[in-house]
Image: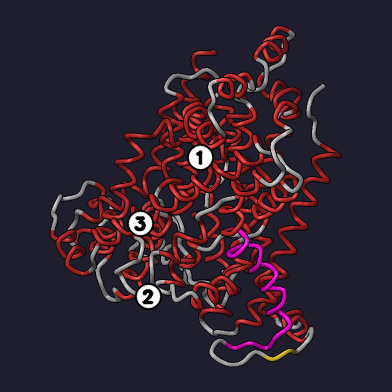
Amino acid sequence: MVHGRRLLVYAFLIISAVITLFPIWWIFATSLETAARAYSFPGALIPQGILSNYQAAWRLAPWLRFLLNSLGIGIATTVLALGTSLLAAYGIVYLPGRFSKVVLGLILATMMIPFYSILVPDYLIVRDLGWLNTYAAQIVPFAANGFAVFMLVQFMRQLPKELRDAARIDGIGDWGYLWQIVVPNLGPALATVSIYLFLLSWNAFLWPLIVTTGPSVQPIQVGLADFLSTANGTDWTVLSAAAAITTLPVLILYIIAQRQIVESVSQTGIKG
Amino acid sequence: MKTIKHSPPHKGLWYLLPALIILGVFWMIPLVMVFGYSFFHFIYGTHPHFVGLSQYQQLFTSSLFWLSLRTTLIFAAAVVIGGSAISLLFAVLLFRGIRAVGLFRALFFLPYVMPVVATSTVWLWMYQPSVGVIDRIFAMVGLPGNIGWVNEPRLALISLIIYTIWFSFGFTMLLFMAGLTNISRELLEAAEVDGANSWRQFWSITWPLLSPTTLFVVVINTINAFQTFTQIYALTRGGPVNGTTTLTYLIYETAFNYFHFGGASATAVVFFLLILALTGLQFWVSRKAVYYGG
């Protein structure tokens, strides 16, 4: 009886997983199919394996450029935001002063501001800085992050206080203490925050859509969206090949770092 | 904390400065500015002039605003309630000591890390009338064909909801699984010894003890649902006939299709206050109705 129920649970989970993964399979299946066969179902379930759609998609847009743009923007944003957040959290936890509570409050309050509500003024600020269609517009506004500060404050408060006294006896100053003791001791917490920051940047869509106008600085999602809206009359097979090109790097990264990504997301609980 | 209190009060501020400057220039000052712009008639490229509350008056008498508010609420309610129920079901099933939990978890979570524009594209292809795979399957099992999944206003919203639940339920499932690890196995085992079946165990132990997690899930998912944009842009562009224009899409459209920056700012202020009120409401609920143990 118990055995039978368990079997039922497995069957249900497997069927659900197949349904969940079907659309992702369908991107690749369609992309490897001739246009004529793509419209036949269930024939197209097992693709023929032709690569001409990829050749066509590759010719029509600079995918490698888009990909490198996304990577560069993501890495730069992550490094900068991690740096400013580390400094801020350190200042609050280890060097508290008269205003640090107020400042922490202000920084945390920015978590409550939906980016959609400040789209217009931010656009005007970026324009006045002469940053339209640049990397800077996509990096600098996100080079600090209230939620990252919040998490790092939590993690830093968990570090043992004795470390601090020992360091002081050894003559290590505030700056040295941050880089020599605090940062190495944060370990996996830094990875969690970094993955959060990187995913936030990687998934950005509306902002780069507004502030970029050409493929030279566009991230891959905006590049794909532009490709789709200008590719009128292009076959679904070629569109699927384009979608597959943007999906493949993420898929590979996910297979490699699946555990860390899942851990980071379940701890931070937020997608950009 | 006490041992380090003798640091000079200004020293820590240097460390706070970089974050403060960035957040100040690109987040805090813009928030003040958006309130300011909402009182100006301001078409991008022309000189703004002060009009008092008339933008708000226009907004509140615009049928498109009320339609998009309604669409946002329906979308959020469907995604939060439907998505949470499905996610909870999978979290509980995966928690029943089955094998390969990690594999199932990774598979269900996969859509969430895929680029939204890419997966929206394949859903758009699947949603195509008659040639799309969904209509094909419908035809095979004898259901009505040639359905305008993204071409009819009412259906388009449902299609958008289905896509959003598909792509996000793995994320919510992770949150529920994290909550379930905090519920003691002994309690459930004791209940089993007392003869409570799984249904009973769920409703009298798991569900009440999970309520802090459930609240967290509802808060996060409601705020995320209100801020949905990418898949609307990729799947329906707010259409057809504004059927999928949510508040975020309305802000985008007003500002960057019609360049009506003043009107977009008024909408943005209403949107901001709505999110603020929602968060406040949920904190209030959490103090009234959630069991935190002890």
Residue B258, disc: none
Q: Mark 2 points at which residue?
A: A213
Q: Alpha-carbon distance for marks 3 and 1?
A: 19 Å
State the extent of the magenta-drawn residues as a range: B23-43
Dividing the picture into quadrants, the one containing residue B4 is top right
Q: Residues within 10 Å of mark 2 (few under 14, many from 20)?
A: some
How many marks are shown on the rendered structure?
A: 3
Q: Looking at the image, is mark 2 or mark 1 earlier in the sequence?
A: 1
Instruction: Determine whether the residue tagged by mark 3 lies in a helix, strand or loop.
Output: helix
Dividing the picture into quadrants, the one containing residue B197 is top right
Q: Tell me the subunit letter for badge 1.
A: A
Side of A87 where A58 appears, left or right: left
Dividing the picture into quadrants, the one containing residue A95 is top right
Residue A193, disc: 1
Instruction: Check the image and report above or below for A60 versus B192.
Output: below
The amino acid pointed to by label 1 is: Val
Instruction: Determine whether the residue tagged by mark 2 lies in a helix, strand or loop.
Output: loop
Q: Residues within 10 Å of mark 1 (few under 14, many from 20)?
A: many
Q: Alpha-carbon distance for marks 2 and 1?
A: 31 Å
